[in-house]
Amino acid sequence: MRLLDLAHARTGDKGDTSQISIIAYDEGDYAFLAEHVTAARVAAHFAAILRGTVTRYELPGLGALNFVLHHALAGGVTRSLRLDPHGKCLGAVLLELEMPGRQAAAEHHGGNDRT
């Protein structure tokens, strides 16, 4: 199971900083996401481009996690030679994160695996 099975993403940027919000499709999945999508896992997932830290903000009322990736955009829009200097594709990249299987998600739902 990948993160995209449970959530969608929105991205933003400012200078060399990227923000990625992960929003659960089902509010019942928020606790599962909060447990398994940590700042450390996000940092490891972006290790090839990340030159700074990752900060995670929890927004339980929205069923969302917001990740701020510092020094992740190769200097920012005006300095980067990347094809995507804004980092808009980083949300899609994060949604490819492998998650524990459906059984673990089902246990968070009290046995309902939503398949």
Image (cartoon, helix red, strand yellow):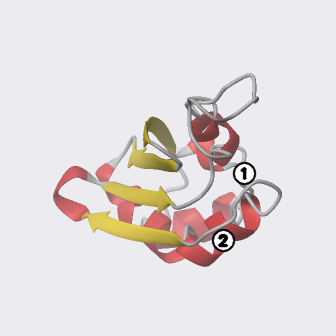
Tell us which disc is closer to us: 1 or 2.
2
Q: Which amino acid type is shown beneath numbered disc 1?
A: Met
Asked which quadrant contains residue 76, the reply is top right
Q: Residues within 10 Å of mark 1 (few under 14, many from 20)?
A: few
> Could you tell me residue 12's position as x and y percent?
42, 37
Q: Nearer the viewer, residue 108 or 40?
A: 40
Q: Residue at x 75, y 29 (%)?
A: 82
- Disc 2 target residue: 41
Q: Nearer the viewer, residue 46 or 111?
A: 46
Q: Which amino acid type is shown beneath numbered disc 2?
A: Arg
> Could you tell me residue 4's position as x and y percent?
60, 40
- Disc 1 target residue: 1
The answer for how far apart the CA atoms under marks 1 and 2 are is 16 Å
> Could you tell me residue 81's position as x and y percent?
76, 29
Disc 1 + disc 2, Cβ < 8 Å: no
Q: Residues within 10 Å of mark 2 (few under 14, many from 20)?
A: some
Q: Is residue 110 among the parts visible in the rendering?
A: no
Point out the tag, 1 or 2, that comes first from the N-terminus: 1
Q: Is residue 38 above or below residue 29?
A: below
Q: Residue at x 72, y 62 (%)?
A: 101
Secondary structure at numbered mark 2: helix
Farthest residue to the right: give it: 48
Give the tally of numbered discs: 2
Position of the C terminus, as image quadrant, is top right
Farthest residue to the left: give it: 61
Q: Is residue 15 above or below residue 35?
A: above
Q: Which mark is residue 82?
A: none
Q: Residue at x 47, y 38 (%)?
A: 9
